[in-house]
Image: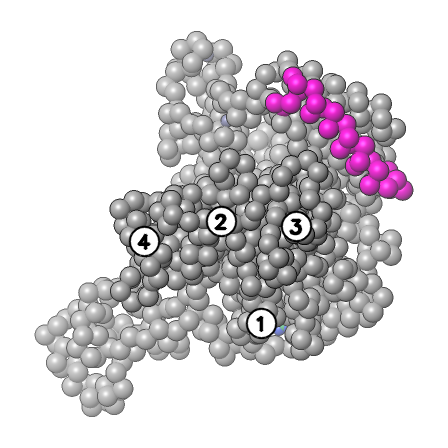
């Protein structure tokens, strides 16, 4: 009797593959275990067992597996069901979901590169013979392919050896980024106990009279202590004038003593943050959420910025943990996790685990196993969208903070899933509840909440009863006409910044474009330098004196004369964050202006460093792109300025207005969060534009009603579902033909609105031309049949030889 297993491979294959196993393996194997299998020519992959049976495959001879990798299932049936749902709904293969769901460390394959770790000490860890052989090979060679390990060890069953080496921290996977969360420690200084008596102290000062600098440092220390009434940090002391060398000699002389405290401890000790209680409004919202959960599995918490949603989440989490449940807390942005981890660990201690793609494999593997085993250390899991794929055992609650954020939707590669929507499905099959939180809910979410599908709870008071920020509109047309502009700053904006800084408050300025200016223009012939590979103009960077493409990274030195007519009369057009930062430096030369955008946050901790410096008030004015809009909490921001509201309004996208509203309200929400009312200044050419008015009046309902009306009229979500098909190819004609063919087939077979084929606004990226086709499916129609038809048509598309090289991607519910 032959024995077989069905195995899913981490590849975009339409079906699982059948492999042969022996009887003992057959008896041992269970769904959700991993096996190392050969595939294609000489390749090894880590596959996942879906099921076992005794029917040989019809079309090919089943190969034998290399070996079994797990003693127990690493993936649960529940999880697999959810992955299948994702594959079906978002029209991709289960293999693609599997690949993106598992930490890389679980998916070793023949092409995976391993490298040695310089910090590994072979003396202190015991290595097996096989492990040692690999370790040794890596001393001579910087990296090894798994395939090469096979020949070094001269056997096929090598993945467990590699896994051992990874867990011993002897090797790492090459693509790995190690960005561990470590509570930050702060260095403090204090006088040794013995010098605190008066007579000892005078004696000390005597002794130090010959070491003038040290004496001054001791004096500074006492001054700081007296004025701040707080422990003195080394940083404060150096800022006050003591040099690091002087401090060190005082420590060496055992006059000063240094000590370290974790930052989060410092923040939460004393401040009753760890043991807070909800305000009356918060409590009311909290009770309403619980009542809502008795009837609805999904509830929207519509709470204005700074209303204290996080504290409500914390109290809710507490109840679920107490019942022994796991809680998943999804954030739109990895960069926000640090802030939240600090807040949650202060409350829940080490029951909090983190899972996201910037963590090392070991850490992700560890969290995976903790979640799988239902460990105490992973009661609350904080993560960006991929945390959705963890092997939950007893999931009780999913919190999706800033649920309106488009980053919850994965754009590339497949699965192109929306984490909020996929979370709702996941919760449903786990009988868990979902709390969506936002100050500016997505239109679809609000629609569901007001049509009885979701519960709805609102919280429209800021915590501590701080007034929402006052919003002031500045008409740019008028300011330019009356010559009241300096660079891109109106007199009103400049005055407001000056006043805010004078009052000891900080300023946030928002400009949704990076670089110095989005394009350079020849004033003689009008030529604008373009990216040779993409259909976009090159962005000018003054500091680097370069032109750069934001789509493919192509860059050149800034030309001194026009590439077309050689004229030297070149001019920059439009403006971005770099230009604003430079203007600020000349408007406020004594203030510290800083910039936060993709260009300045690239480094490992780039983002956190800027956030920290801003929090520590080392930065007076922070200029940034939409990164600033995402749920950050600062308590000393007196004003927010939006330099140009208009470029957000005119995007060729049915969500443009909704997004512009959300972005402005969210950025505005950074102003005046703690003790006093903040101010927001918006510069615009269109002060009468509806969206601008709605932002000014904090009129979410008005925005929603208008947008929903438009969506209804023009057949968009929530009334219609969209499926977007994108075709790409280097050959323009071939692409055009193929897109037309596909369009014709779809519109003939679907009896639905099919739009296109359209050339998108940017119709070429990295030398590939792009066409899109949009299918609109009205509410009542079942998606399943439509998708089947689409898949069938794509199958025939693929069968046309000249179309096969055209890359086709499908995006269900595109954003
Ligand atoms: P949101 O997420 O709604 O924008 P936050 O949860 O960040 O608002 O709360 C805003 C501020 O108010 C934070 O500094 C938070 O610590 C504080 N805060 C909110 N609720 C409470 C509470 N019940 N007790 C003490 N501080 C609170
Ligand atoms: Zn020219
Ligand atoms: Zn480009």
Crowding at dot 3, Cα within 10 Å, few <14 / some 14-19 / many 20+, comes out as few
Alpha carbon separation for disc pair 4 and 3 = 37 Å
Asked if one can make out residue 612 in the rendered structure from this viewpoint, the answer is no
Instruction: Tell me, yes or no, whether the highlighted magenta stretch contains residue 794.
Output: yes
Q: How far from the left and from the top, in percent, is residue 549?
A: 48, 29
Q: Earlier in the sequence, mark 3 or mark 2?
A: 3
Q: Which residue is mark 2?
A: 108
User: So how many labels did they put on this image?
Assistant: 4
Instruction: Work out whether mark 3 precedes mark 1 in sequence or the reverse, and give the earlier one.
Output: 3
Give how far apart the Cα atoms at labels 2 and 1 are. Answer: 25 Å
Task: Choose mark 4 or mark 3, whichever is in front.
Answer: 3
Specify start and end residues of the magenta stretch as a single range: 778-806
- Mark in front: 3 vs 1: 3
Q: Which residue is mark 3?
A: 2
Specify whether tag 2 is near ligand 3 (CB below 8 Å): no
Which residue in the structure is indicated by mark 4?
A: 133
Q: Is mark 1 within 8 Å of ligand 1?
A: no
**Cα gap from disc 3 to disc 1, whole angstroms:** 39 Å
């Amino acid at each position: 009797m032959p024995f077989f297993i069905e195995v899913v491979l981490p590849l975009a294959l339409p079906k699982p593959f059948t492999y042969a196993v022996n009887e003992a393996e057959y008896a041992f194997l269970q769904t959700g275990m991993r096996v190392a299998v050969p595939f294609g020519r000489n390749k090894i992959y880590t596959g996942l067992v879906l099921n076992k049976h005794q029917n040989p495959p019809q079309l090919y001879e089943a190969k034998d597996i290399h070996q079994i990798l797990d003693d127990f299932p690493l993936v649960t049936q529940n999880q697999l069901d959810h992955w299948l749902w994702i594959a079906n709904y978002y029209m991709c293969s289960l293999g693609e979901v599997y690949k993106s769901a598992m930490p890389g460390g679980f998916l070793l394959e023949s092409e995976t590169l391993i490298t040695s770790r310089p910090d590994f000490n072979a003396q202190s860890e015991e290595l097996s013979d096989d492990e040692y052989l690999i370790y040794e090979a890596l001393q001579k060679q910087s990296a090894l392919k798994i395939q090469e390990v096979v020949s070094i060890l001269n056997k096929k069953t090598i993945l467990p050896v590699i896994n051992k080496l990874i867990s011993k921290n002897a090797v790492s996977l090459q693509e790995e980024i190690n960005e561990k969360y470590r509570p930050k420690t702060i260095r403090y200084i204090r006088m040794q106990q013995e010098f605190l008596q008066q007579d000892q102290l005078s004696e000390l000062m005597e002794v130090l009279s010959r070491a003038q600098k040290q004496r001054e440092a001791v004096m500074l220390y006492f001054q700081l202590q007296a004025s701040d009434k707080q422990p003195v940090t080394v940083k404060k002391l150096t800022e006050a004038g003591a040099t690091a060398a002087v401090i060190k000699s005082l420590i060496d002389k055992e006059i000063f003593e240094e000590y370290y405290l974790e930052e989060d401890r410092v923040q939460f000790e004393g401040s009753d943050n760890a043991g807070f209680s909800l305000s009356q409004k918060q409590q009311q919202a909290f009770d309403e959420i619980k009542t809502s959960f008795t009837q609805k599995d999904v509830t929207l918490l519509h709470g204005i910025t700074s209303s204290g949603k996080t504290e409500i989440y914390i109290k809710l989490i507490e109840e679920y943990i107490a019942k022994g449940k796991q809680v998943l807390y999804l954030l739109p942005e990895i960069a926000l996790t640090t802030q939240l981890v600090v807040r949650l660990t202060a409350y829940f201690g080490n029951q909090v685990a983190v899972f996201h793609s910037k963590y090392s494999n070991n850490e992700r593997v560890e969290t995976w196993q903790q979640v799988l085993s239902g460990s105490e250390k992973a009661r609350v899991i904080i993560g960006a969208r991929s945390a959705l794929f963890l092997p939950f055992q007893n999931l009780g609650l999913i919190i999706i903070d800033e649920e309106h954020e488009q980053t919850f939707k994965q754009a590339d590669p497949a699965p192109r899933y929306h984490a909020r929507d996929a979370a709702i499905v996941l919760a449903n099959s786990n009988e868990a509840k979902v709390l969506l939180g936002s100050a500016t809910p997505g239109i679809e979410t609000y629609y569901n909440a007001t049509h009885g599908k979701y519960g709805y709870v609102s919280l429209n008071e800021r915590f501590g009863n701080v007034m929402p920020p006052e919003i002031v509109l500045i008409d740019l047309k008028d300011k330019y006409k009356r010559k009241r502009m300096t660079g891109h700053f109106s007199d009103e904006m400049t005055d407001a910044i000056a006043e805010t800084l004078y009052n000891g408050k900080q300023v946030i300025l928002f400009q949704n474009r990076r670089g110095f200016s989005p394009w350079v223009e020849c004033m003689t012939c009008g030529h604008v330098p373009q990216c040779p590979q993409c259909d976009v103009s090159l962005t000018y960077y003054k500091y680097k004196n370069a032109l750069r493409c934001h789509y493919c990274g192509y860059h050149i030195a800034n030309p001194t004369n026009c590439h077309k007519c050689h004229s030297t009369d070149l001019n920059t057009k439009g403006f971005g964050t770099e230009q604003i930062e430079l203007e600020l430096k000349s408007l406020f030369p004594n203030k510290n202006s800083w910039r936060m955008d993709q260009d300045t946050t690239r480094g490992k901790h780039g983002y956190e460093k800027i956030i920290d410096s801003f929090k520590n008030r080392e930065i007076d004015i922070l200029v940034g792109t939409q990164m600033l809009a995402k749920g950050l909490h600062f308590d000393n921001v007196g004003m927010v300025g939006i330099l140009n509201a208009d470029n957000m309004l005119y995007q060729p996208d049915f969500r443009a207005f909704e997004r512009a509203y959300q972005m402005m309200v969210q950025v505005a929400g950074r102003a005046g969060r703690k003790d006093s009312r903040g101010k927001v200044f918006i510069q615009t050419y269109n002060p009468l534009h509806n969206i601008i008015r709605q932002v000014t009046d904090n009129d979410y309902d008005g925005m929603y009603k208008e947008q929903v009306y438009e969506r209804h009229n023009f057949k968009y979500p929530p009334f219609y579902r969209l499926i977007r098909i994108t075709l790409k190819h280097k050959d323009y004609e071939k692409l055009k033909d193929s897109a037309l063919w596909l369009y014709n087939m779809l519109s003939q077979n679907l009896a639905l609105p099919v739009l296109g084929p359209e050339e998108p606004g940017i119709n070429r990226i990295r030398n590939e031309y792009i066409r899109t086709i949009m299918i609109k499916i009205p509410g009542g129609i079942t998606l399943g049949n439509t998708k089947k038809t689409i898949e069938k048509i794509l199958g025939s598309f693929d069968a046309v030889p000249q179309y096969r090289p055209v890359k086709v991607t499908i995006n269900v519910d595109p954003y």
